[in-house]
């Protein structure tokens, strides 16, 4: 996934308390104020974690800034999923190194998956790094920072079987005030042979559902109108009440969150084909506000490759899951993740992936060429034997097919009217709004009086370009 640099906004919250809006910190002219700047890379879980980190840092009197030049503490929340993701961070550190030369005393911290994967070696290799903190150790940041302020480098990369940061109210860093992410679980117990996540994020654990519902309610009360429940494999969410021993499944959690208010949209990511139950689909069908969109990564269309990937489903199983989606939630959009050039992949396997994509008719896919990750099952057991050119060619074919499928989807949407949640101004013009329909498709349309971010509008789609639908509000 593309690394996106976070752009801090001036919203702050106290931990566990009522939310309040801070004045824009960058405008507060107090040179003694301690400021932190954070950049997030990788998946949505990392972006969500940065908001937890911001909340914990508030305890140490660190305030967020959007201006890296003003920061006393620069944090990179990092990703290890592919080699390129780690290279990006190393490059970024070179730039920060130059910046630090002009601002001695500025501390630099590496958080997230790269911190967890590389541990002490990051402190040894990257001399400018003062802190290395893994995804389960963020509560230790105030202590580590105290020590770092005294010149001692600090590291905590302990993984936990319990930590879910359930009691922490995240500081919404990049908020549009309408949509928000809520982490419902951490870690992953699957062992997909290509994947580094089980090593960087540890064992799977689910968060107390009561804290999830309360966070979502709180967001709704503040004017938010959409929450996305996040986990590496949301379908295996399972929480047992410590006293009653009652268990809660993902389908039950989804319904609880949907019941908060019909105007609160609920999304979730990521679903795992081996675990996605019909119960979840029935919940989607029963609640209008659970969005008709499933991200169901297939990875490969070849059963032989899927077995090597240790995905624990085959092509037939995956097809069966898509058929269940179509049967139970007829209007549902499906997207995917695809890896090109996994170990031993033949042309025939690659053709299976293309035919799977066309059959599943994905509205969107994240597409990657295989990148071997040290320590994973695949790195230990198989040879990374598909040459770079072949990987590149196969990936281009996959991308071209997805482009065609997306264009066909968009063309089919022209002439339809969708209920859209307005997220804010469109990227190109402040005379236009942008918002998504239930199927997660972005639609851009001219503003009309009476509509604002957070409102719902019925939008008639007039035309489409490759990425976006263009429409107008229809009023009854
Ligand atoms: N938990 C999610 C995936 C999280 S990682 C799931 O199981 O679907 C996001 C995506 O990165 C994966 O779906 C996969 O397509 C891709 N990915 C993971 N490891 C990779 C690797 N070593 N090389 C290339 N792509 C990889
Ligand atoms: Fe990685 Fe597989 Fe877990 Fe997804 S389910 S995070 S791909 S190990
Ligand atoms: Fe990357 Fe870690 Fe997410 S490796 S994809 S940031 S869980």
Image: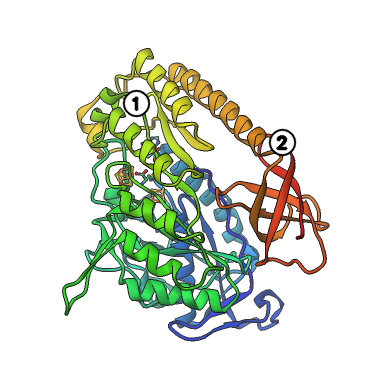
Residues under labels 1 and 2: Cα distance? 32 Å
The circle drawn on residue 291 is: none
Q: Secondary structure at mark 2?
A: loop
Q: Secondary structure at mark 1?
A: loop
For label 2, count other residues whose C-alpha is less than 10 Å away and answer few (under 14), some (14-19) or many (20+).
few
Q: Nearer the viewer, residue 475 or 436?
A: 475
Residue furthest toward the top? 347
Examine the rendered structure and indicate whether residue 298 appears above or below residue 14. Answer: above
Q: Residue at x 56, y 52 (%)?
A: 438
The circle drawn on residue 465 is: 2
Q: Nearer the viewer, residue 11 or 145?
A: 11
Rendered-image quadrant of the C terminus: bottom right
Where's ligand 1: which quadrant? Answer: top left
Q: Position of residue 51 (x, y in %)?
A: 48, 68
Say how the picture is coloured.
rainbow
Q: Nearer the viewer, residue 40 or 435?
A: 435
Tally of marks:
2
**Does residue 140 appear in the picture of this structure?**
no
**Does residue 78 appear in the picture of this structure?**
yes
Which residue is tagged 1?
Answer: 342
Examine the rendered structure and indicate whether residue 260 appears above or below residue 405. Answer: below
Q: Is residue 348 left or right of residue 32?
A: left
Q: Position of residue 446 (x, y in %)?
A: 81, 54
When asked about the image quadrant of residue 467, the answer is top right
Residue furthest toward the front? 476
Label 1–label 2 contact, CB within 8 A: no
Disc 1 or 2, which lies upstream in sequence?
A: 1
């Amino acid at each position: 996934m593309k690394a996106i640099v976070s752009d801090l906004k001036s919203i702050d919250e106290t931990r566990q308390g009522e939310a309040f809006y801070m004045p824009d910190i960058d405008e507060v002219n107090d040179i003694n104020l301690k400021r932190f700047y954070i950049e997030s890379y990788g998946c949505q879980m990392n972006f969500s974690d940065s908001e937890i980190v911001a909340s914990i840092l508030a305890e140490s009197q660190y305030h967020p800034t959007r201006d890296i030049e003003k920061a006393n503490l620069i944090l990179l929340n990092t990703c290890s999923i592919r080699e390129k993701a780690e290279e990006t961070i190393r490059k970024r550190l070179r730039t920060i190194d130059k910046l630090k030369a002009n601002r001695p005393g500025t501390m630099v911290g590496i958080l997230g998956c790269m911190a967890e994967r590389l541990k002490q070696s990051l402190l040894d290799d990257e001399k400018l790094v003062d802190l290395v903190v893994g995804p389960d150790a963020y509560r230790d940041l105030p202590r580590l920072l105290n020590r770092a302020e005294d010149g001692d480098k600090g590291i905590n990369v302990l993984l936990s079987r319990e930590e879910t940061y359930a009691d922490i109210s995240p500081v919404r860093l990049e908020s549009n005030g309408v949509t928000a992410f809520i982490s419902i679980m951490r870690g992953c117990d699957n062992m997909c042979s290509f994947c580094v996540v089980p090593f960087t994020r540890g064992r799977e654990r689910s968060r107390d559902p009561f804290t999830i519902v309360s966070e979502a309610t709180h967001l709704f009360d503040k004017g938010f109108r959409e929450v996305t429940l996040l986990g590496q494999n949301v379908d295996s969410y399972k929480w047992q009440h410590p006293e009653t021993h009652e268990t809660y499944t993902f389908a039950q959690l989804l319904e609880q969150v949907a019941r908060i208010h019909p105007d609160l949209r609920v999304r979730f990511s990521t679903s795992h084909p081996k675990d996605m139950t019909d119960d979840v689909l029935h919940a989607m069908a029963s609640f209008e506000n659970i969005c008709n969109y499933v991200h169901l990564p297939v990875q490969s269309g070849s059963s032989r490759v899927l077995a090597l990937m240790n995905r624990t489903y085959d092509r037939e199983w995956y097809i069966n899951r898509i058929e269940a989606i179509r049967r139970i939630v007829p209007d549902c959009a499906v997207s995917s993740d695809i890896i090109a050039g996994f170990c031993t992949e033949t042309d025939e396997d690659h053709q299976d992936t293309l035919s799977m994509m066309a059959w599943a008719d994905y509205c969107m896919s994240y597409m990657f060429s295989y990148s071997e990750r040290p320590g994973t099952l695949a790195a230990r057991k198989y040879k990374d034997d598909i040459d770079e050119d072949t990987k590149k060619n196969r990936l281009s074919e996959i991308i071209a097919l997805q482009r065609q499928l997306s264009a066909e989807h968009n063309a089919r949407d022209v002439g339809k009217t969708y209920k859209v949640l307005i997220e804010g101004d469109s990227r190109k013009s402040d005379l236009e709004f942008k918002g998504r329909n239930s199927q997660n498709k972005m639609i851009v349309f001219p503003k009309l009086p009476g509509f604002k971010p957070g409102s719902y509008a019925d939008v008639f789609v007039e035309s489409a370009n490759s990425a976006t639908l263009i429409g107008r509000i229809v009023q009854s």
